[in-house]
Image (cartoon, rainbow, N blue to C red):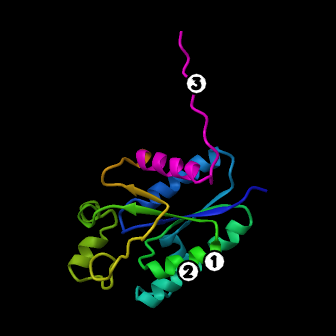
Amino acid sequence: MSTGFTLWLTGLSGAGKSTLARLLEAELKARGLRVEVLDGDEVRQNLSQGLGFSKADRDTQVRRIGYVARLLTRNGVVTIVAAISPYRKAREEVRAQIGRFIEIYVQCPLRTCIERDVKGLYKKALAGEIQQFTGISDPYEPPDRPEIVVDTSRQSPDESLQAILAGLEETGYLPQQAAKAVSVS
């Protein structure tokens, strides 16, 4: 059985965490790894119904995701978490519990996330229709020392994916991929 690890993608809503999680999932499966994605929105619907968006509820959400990630990781699964997880202390708590944990900061300026507003949530938050919205009326605490940082306002999804894969290879979580041979006629 291969050794599992958790890739924890954190960043503002609309930064590109879910997109990158799905790209990573496909790439890691293609490399023969067992992979599971825990998307914050999906977990909230299925495992954390009834939780609101207070700091205590958000921390509970992160702990629940962390618990599932720890179980998967210890059973040899590469677990990709895509969750805002806005508070450093909660992320550090799950890092300590999981052990084989790589924090990936999906950096994207607030103004770019607002421009993207994929789900229409920023519009509602700015209009006061959503309270305790991360980045608007509730804080987001960027990681102090993430293992990998991508900037989705400057990188395409594929460029961000390649940066993450390179970081995983550099840290030894993934074996180095051999350069693809170019045939010359």
**Circles 1 and 3: CB atoms closer than 8 Å:** no
Q: Of residues 29 and 148, which is closer to you in this image?
A: 148
- Residue range in magenta is 159-185
Is 181 colored magenta in this rendering? Answer: yes
The residue sitting at the right extreme is 1
Q: Of residues 126 and 162, which is closer to you in this image?
A: 162
Look at the numbered disc 1 and give the secondary structure of its residue: helix
The circle drawn on residue 97 is 1
Q: Of residues 158 and 41, which is closer to you in this image?
A: 158
Label 2: few (<14), some (14–19) or many (≥20) C-alpha neighbours in 10 Å = some
**Circles 3 and 2: CB atoms closer than 8 Å:** no
Residue depicted at 61% across the width and 49% down the height: 28
Distance between the Cα atoms at labels 3 and 2?
43 Å
Distance between the Cα atoms at labels 1 and 3?
41 Å
Quarter of the picture holding the N terminus: bottom right
Is 107 colored magenta in this rendering? Answer: no
Q: Is residue 158 left or right of residue 136?
A: right
Question: What count of labels does the image hold?
Answer: 3
**Circles 2 and 1: CB atoms closer than 8 Å:** yes
**Above or below, comparing residue 64 to residue 82 in the picture:** below
Distance between the Cα atoms at labels 2 and 1?
6 Å
Q: Amino acid at mark 2?
A: Glu
Residue 87 placement (x, y as % from top left):
43, 79
* Residue carrying label 3: 181
Label 3: few (<14), some (14–19) or many (≥20) C-alpha neighbours in 10 Å = few
The circle drawn on residue 93 is 2
Look at the numbered disc 3 and give the secondary structure of its residue: loop
The residue sitting at the left extreme is 127
For the question of whether residue 42 can be seen, the reply is: yes
Residue depicted at 64% across the width and 73% down the height: 98
